[in-house]
Image (cartoon, rainbow, N blue to C red):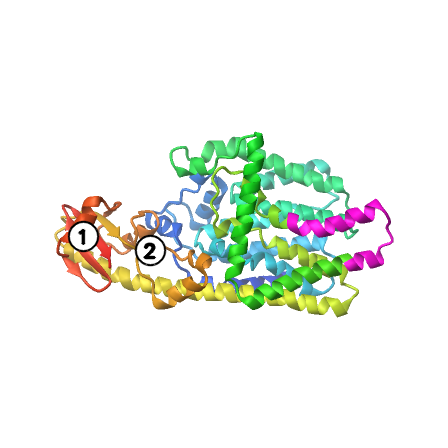
Amino acid sequence: MKWYQFDKKNIINYLLLSMLSFLYILPLVLINLYFKDDLGWSLRGSIGLKGDGRPLAEYLVLMLCGGEPVTDTAPLPLILAVLFLSYTLILYSKANLDFISNRCGLLTILLLIITNPFALECLSYRYGSMVMVVALGIPFLIFSMPDAMSKGKLFVYSSLLSIALMSLYQPALGMCLVLFIVNIFLVLFQERKANYGLEVLRMIGIGAGAIVYKLIIAEHYVSQSDWRFSASQTLELRPGSIIAIFQNIFATCNYIIEFLAETSLWYRVVLLLFVLLTMFVSVAFYCDKNEKRGGRKAIDIAFLLLSPVCILISSFLPLMILRQQTLKLRIFIALGGFLFYLGILLLHFTKKHPTFFRPLLLLLILCNLYHYTCIYSYGNAVNNHNEYAKYLVYHIVHDIEIINADEEFTRISFIGEMPKSQRTQIFCDKYPLTGALLPQYITNDGWIGGAYVLHYLQNSLDIETDTDEDRQIAGSAEPVMANSIYSCYTNADKIIVVFN
């Protein structure tokens, strides 16, 4: 049997994991909304991912849409991507986690990769979700390649897949570092027969691919004329950069803590119990059963204690070398590797101790259950936000078309922020960081928020930033049309919509 094929047991695991993953993304599949960049892409039929330094991502989207102009095939891209991710996860488990005989335990830890609550934004895009999730699956593909493969092939394939990953979605590179540490653990604690040299060779191949991407692909494709150029710049090689990297790491960890502070109290308690008990049990059982003495035993214990911290930081470490740091949930696509690794520790050290295994596995299942509740509550909040935005945009477009019946206006500006429905406001007050993911509709951004209005206008208007003169007119003149939510004014050939 080839290394990329499944036997009957793994086929069943794949079907079960795919079903559980689909159940997780179901609310986003049912909503099927236009999320941020989707508004501009669907309106203009082009996506521009090449300018982000992601040419493979653009080719993948175009292939699924039958070329330009881009047509809307959602939610098929997300479904296909989740099926691919499930395949790579089972492939990885076949190659590296064959010591896990408990199917429930195996599926629980694999599911943590997709149910990572920090990846909600990545799953929300109609087009971009596919390339992000596929990028997340590539590291598992790299670390599934058999040890029997020649060193030359292992290096070349690792490099090519690394280039593909970087050309899809760079934050997923953190998962390569996570899996490297996981595989070092498996070798160190004799769950894999491979040697350290092969794992290092994989990482050298991944690093070589990343360098090739940076020097050739990014240099050629990243747009030089807008914000994308500055966003792609990395820190210079000088002593001060080390301090900047540590500052970036601390700021990112604070952001993670801030996000966790929004979660339910019972989840934080369960999560903390699972982390502490798993670490305690792992070290205790290792010390109890292992006959090693001296320095080697101390090294193993130090690895057990420090590796979870290294996993956590590694999941986002590649982004810490960027000059401009933007803390958004979508950069944490690899953070699910933290609980994934702790789950492996649990299944390794308690496989012969069901008294400890069952309650700890239950804690991990509860964590997964909370992740499901997160995406379902998020899905309902997004849906409600979208319904209210539709209600407003229908009325605004209707009023604009009445004002512009003679087609004498060519421009439009919006002043103020579109109000949220009461249900949506409750969600945003409870979960500020997650609530910030909700799309900002009806703004002066012609690519994202303003494009929402253009979706419904028969005769397109140019969206422009409001001026001091616009605000002065809105503050002194009588509105052309008005209601309790917004008022409409005119300024030469421009329509001004002001939210009250």
The residue carrying pointer 2 sits among few (fewer than 14), some (14 to 19) or many (20 or more) residues within 10 Å by Cα, namely: many
**Stretch in magenta:** 284-310
Q: Residue at x 78, y 66 (%)?
A: 353
Kind of residue indicated by mark 2:
Tyr
Mark 1 touches mark 2? (CB < 8 Å): no
Task: Tell me the SS state at disc 2.
Answer: loop
Viewer can see residue 222: yes
Q: Is residue 7 visible?
A: no
In front here: 260 or 208?
260
Q: Quadrant of residue 452?
A: bottom left
Find residue 441 and name its label.
Answer: 2
The quadrant of the rendering that contains the C terminus is bottom left
* Residue 486 appears left or right of 270: left
Indicate which disc residue 93 carries.
none
Give amino acid for label 1: Ala
Which residue appears at 82% of the width and 49% of the height?
297
| Magenta span includes 300 | yes
Question: Disc 1 and disc 2: Cα gap in Å?
Answer: 21 Å
Q: How many marks can you see?
A: 2
Point 71% across, 69% down: residue: 358
Percent x, y of residue 79:
51, 58
**Above or below, comparing residue 111 to residue 470 in the picture:** below
Q: Nearer the viewer, residue 366 or 293?
A: 293
Does the magenta-highlighted stretch encompass residue 293? yes
Q: Hey, which quadrant is residue 424 in on the image?
A: bottom left
User: Of the numbered discs in the image, which one, if any, rests on residue 474?
Assistant: 1
Quarter of the image where one finds residue 104: bottom right
Which residue is at the front of the view, 3 or 147?
Answer: 147
Residue 432 screen position, x and y as percent: 44, 59
- Answer with mark 1 or mark 2, whichever residue precedes in sequence: 2
